[in-house]
Image (cartoon, rainbow, N blue to C red):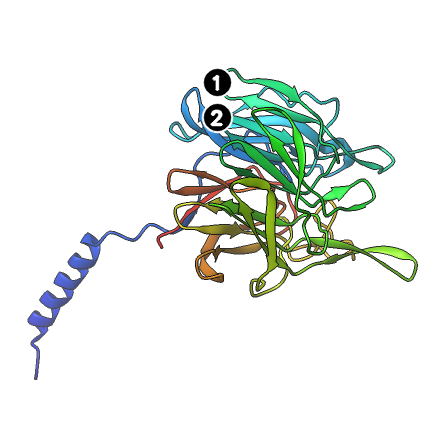
Amino acid sequence: MQVTTAAAMLLTALTLAGCERSPQPEPLSQTADFALPEPISNNAVAVADGPEGPTLYSFNGLKAGKTWKDTSNAAFACVIATRSCKTIASVPVPEGRLASAAVTVAGKIYIFGGYSVAANGDELSTPEVFAFDPATGRYEQKADMPTPVDDMLAVPYQNRFIYLISGWHDEANVSVVQMFDTQTGAWTEATPFPGTPVFGHSGGIAGNSIIVSDGVASVFADGKRKFVAAKLTWRGDIDPNNPTQISWRGVDAHSGVVKYRMAAIGDDAGQRIIFAGGGDNPYNYDGIGYDGVPAKPSGGFFAYDLKSDKWIELGRLAEPGMDHRGLAKAGQEYYILGGMDAEQNVTDRIVKFRIDR
C-alpha cells in the first residue's frame, strides 16, 4: 500500500506530538538536589522525625582528607521536606570516630562505638553509646558496650531492643551478638553469630528475621595477619518471646563479588532486606585495599527476600558508592548519605532510590 508524502508527514507529526505529550518515567534512582554540609564517609546514618518532620541524620565519619586527622565527630541533619541540610551538635566524644552505627528506636537515635585513630596509626574500638533526641538536639550517654566493637551490624527489634552483630574489637573480629534494651539501659548477650566473624558486613531486619551479608575476615598466613573478603549470608530468626534466642542458618550468598560496607536496611512491609552500593576490595579507611589496589564502588541495589529465601536484583544507582554504614528510609524513598565515589573521593552527595516492586 502506498502512502502519499502529505499523509506520511501528517502521520509523523502526530506521532511526534504524541511522544511529546507522553511523560518520561521517573528514574528509580537520582542524586538528590540537596547535599550534606561537607563531604563525609564511613558515617553512621539514621532517619527520625525532627522538629521539621522526617529528617536524615549523619554522625561521625571520615572527612575529605582521609588521614587520621580527618576522623570526625560531626553530625548533620537533612530535612526532607525543605531539601536542606545543616550541621548540628557534634557527638560528645573527644576525637573523631569511624565505623560507628546508628539506629532509631522509639523516636530517639542510638549511636554506638566506632574506632578512633591516633597519629601513629593505632586504632582503638570505643565503647561509648549515646541516645540523640531529635526534638531537643541533645545527647544522653548510656551504658558502654560490654565488648567495644566497630564496623558491626546494628539492627532494631520490637521498637525496644538493638542487636550489635559481630564486628571488630581492637585486635580481632568477634562472634558476639550484644543486645541493648533501650527501656532499661541493660546489655545482654544473644545467641552468638555462627558464621565467620567479620567486620564491614551489612544487613537488616524485617519482622523477626535478620540477614547478615559479606564482610571482611581476619586470617593468619605465613605468620602475618591478612584481611580477606568473606562471601557469606546468614539468616537469624528471633524468638519473639525470648529475644536473646536467635536461630541462625546459612543461606545462599548473592551473585557477584563480595561487597564491603554496603548500605542496607530492612523493609518490614516487603519482608526483605535492601542492599545498595559497597566496595569490591576490602580496605581500612582510605579506600585503598589492604592489597594496595584501590577499591571500586558498586552501582546496584538489590534485596534478600525473606519469604522465598532468594536474592532479587532491583535497579541501578544514579551514582555508584561505597564506604557506607547504613541506608535510611523515609516514606517510599531510600537514601544514601555521603560515602566514596569511583575515585575513592569522599563525597557530600545524597543518592536516593525507590523500589517499584
Task: Classify residue 114 by image quadrant.
Answer: top right
Q: Are marks 2 and 1 in contact (CB under 8 Å)?
A: yes
Q: Residue furthest front?
A: 241
Residue at coordinates 71% horizontally, 51% vertically from top-left? 198
Q: Residue furthest right?
A: 223
Q: Name the one closer to the observer, 238 or 159.
A: 238
Vertical relation: 61 (above or below) 89: below
Residue 135, disc: 1
Precedes in sequence: disc 2 or disc 1: 2
- Is residue 335 visible in this depiction of the protein? yes
Task: Classify residue 43 by image quadrant.
Answer: top right
Amino acid on which disc 1 is placed: Ala
Vertical relation: 156 (above or below) 90: below
Residue at coordinates 51% horizontally, 15% vertically from top-left? 136
Residue at coordinates 57% horizontally, 23% vertically from top-left? 132
The quadrant in which the C terminus is found is bottom left
Q: Nearer the viewer, mark 2 or mark 1?
A: 2
- Is residue 39 visible in this depiction of the protein? no
User: Quick check: 334 left or right of 103?
Assistant: left
Please state the horizontal and vertical placement of residue 154, each as a whole percent of the image: 60, 40
| SS state under label 2 | loop
Q: How many marks?
A: 2
Residue bearing the label numbered 2? 107
Distance from label 2 to label 1 (Cα)?
Answer: 9 Å
Amino acid on which disc 2 is placed: Gly
Please state the horizontal and vertical placement of residue 190, each as a whole percent of the image: 65, 42
Residue at coordinates 50% horizontally, 46% vertically from top-left? 208
